[in-house]
Image: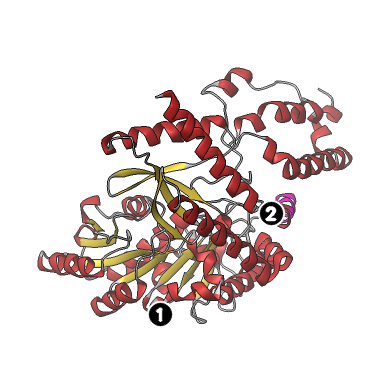
Amino acid sequence: MTGSKMTDSLDPGAFRRHAHEVADWIADYFEKVEGFPVRSQAQPGELLAALPSSPPEQPEPMKRILADFRQLIPPGMTHWQHPSFFAFFPANSSPPSVLAEMLTAGMAAQCMLWETSPAANELEARMMEWLRELLGLPHDWKGVIQDSASGATLCAMLAARERARGKTVVDRLAFYTSAEANSSVQKGARIAGFPLDCIRRVATDQRQAMRPGALAKAIEADRAAGLTPAGVVATLGTTGTGAMDPLAEIGAICQRENIYLHVDAAWAGSALMLPECQHLLNGIEHADSFVFNPHKWMFTNFDCSAHFLKNPESLQRSLSINPVYLQNTRDEQITEYRDFGISLGRRFRALKLWFVIRSFGAEGLREKIREHIAWAKELAQTIQNSEDFELVTGPNLALITWRYAPKNRAPKTLDDLNKRLLKAINDDGRLYLTPGAVNGRLVIRFSIGQTRTEARHVRQAWRIIQETASSLQHSS
């Protein structure tokens, strides 16, 4: 093989041509994504069957690679940036965020230390200060960018374990969370070494929020049994229904009992930028850490999770390792974020926050979030006024849950009817919804938050839901 063939893929001129082609494809995708089915219609094994079973021995031209990308990959993707994506929670994006991702990919920086990327370190410090101010968090808290809320929750558990260490062994520690909390809490507990039978799932009230009284009783029972209560995870915006655990009451219990309190606001945290949502933070002064995901509802590409700590020392004691090759003469002058997370290697995530916050401005961010909340309220009212549909929960910010409940159907058959309705909606491809459960009943979630969603998409989704429900009713 000639040297020129070996180096074609590294040629700056070829890169420039193909980069323009890729940028054009991305811009076209922004404009045309609405034409794709929201949820991928691919069948299992479909892409595998189209791919060679062995890697190529000889270089292939980028023109062919990009052609294969266009043909094979978009049809096999669920389009999270589609304006009719109403499933899960959003994992949204925006043009300024994509531009920042392109630049970070081009530099391919490894930001594990201040010394390896000073600008990345200091931009992260300032972006976390900006976010802290935007959300109204305590001004003396320290912030770090993690990959996900799951990672931040694991870090909170490690910090809680470190703070409790010396009092008891790990298998005598107890952790508490809502019965509606995200599964990442249990997963984090496993990784942190907490036995699952020491994870307490505290009962919830009629709003699906944690009952402070039930929490206090669980703590009292564990102390009587010789266990040490180590930490509580409270949720602002549960995955199932968007429920808000009462921070003030939970925080008072944690302060009285000297228990670490972590607040998971992965989705709902973005709404704290709105003055009218600041009441949700009542009691935050009692918390030890807080996380929210700009990559969910702040128009910033995945992954980017903002983790704030009142006193970082417990976490740093758990994670700090300082071999000679990581030491530098400026350790006392700077914050080394490697000591705030699981991995040593770190991406330059702060750049996309810088681009997004400056491009939208604080008021632009607030305006979009307010619109999503207003459209959820409008849809909830529409469902309440409908004879054959039932609003089950919400609106909690921009999330509602509902079910199809025609009067001529026996209640015991409604779960199956709603399963069939959900499948028919998602198979149709014009919108994407996901299920939930409330008091043992199947519900359908409707989460608004995609960057390009407009009121017309929400109203069109309701028409599609009604049409699909009617066709099911007539065919049964």
Residue shown at 50% from the left, 76% from the top: 137
Q: Crowding at label 1, few (<14), some or many (≥20) Cα neighbours within 10 Å? A: some
Q: Which mark is residue 285?
A: 1
Amino acid, disc 2: Ser
Residue 305: percent from left, percent from top: 53, 60
Q: Nearer the viewer, residue 110 or 430?
A: 430
Position of 225 relative to 410 (above/below): below
Residue shown at 39% from the left, 24% from the top: 476
Label 2 – label 1 distance at C-alpha:
33 Å
Helix, strand or loop: magenta stretch:
helix
Circles 2 and 1, Cβ within 8 Å, touching? The answer is no
Q: Nearer the viewer, residue 294 or 457?
A: 457
Q: Earlier in the sequence, mark 2 or mark 1?
A: 2
Check disc 2 and report its element: helix, strand or loop.
loop
Q: Is residue 324 visible?
A: no
Amino acid, disc 1: Glu
Q: Quadrant of residue 221?
A: bottom left
In the rendered structure, which segment of residues is drawn in magenta? 99-109
Q: Quadrant of the N terminus?
A: top right
Residue 215: percent from left, percent from top: 23, 66
Position of 474 relative to 208 (above/below): above
Residue shown at 45% from the left, 65% from the top: 320
Q: Which mark is residue 94?
A: 2
Position of 86 relative to 218 (above/below): above
> Of tags 2 and 1, which is closer to the observer?
2
Q: Quadrant of residue 363?
A: bottom right
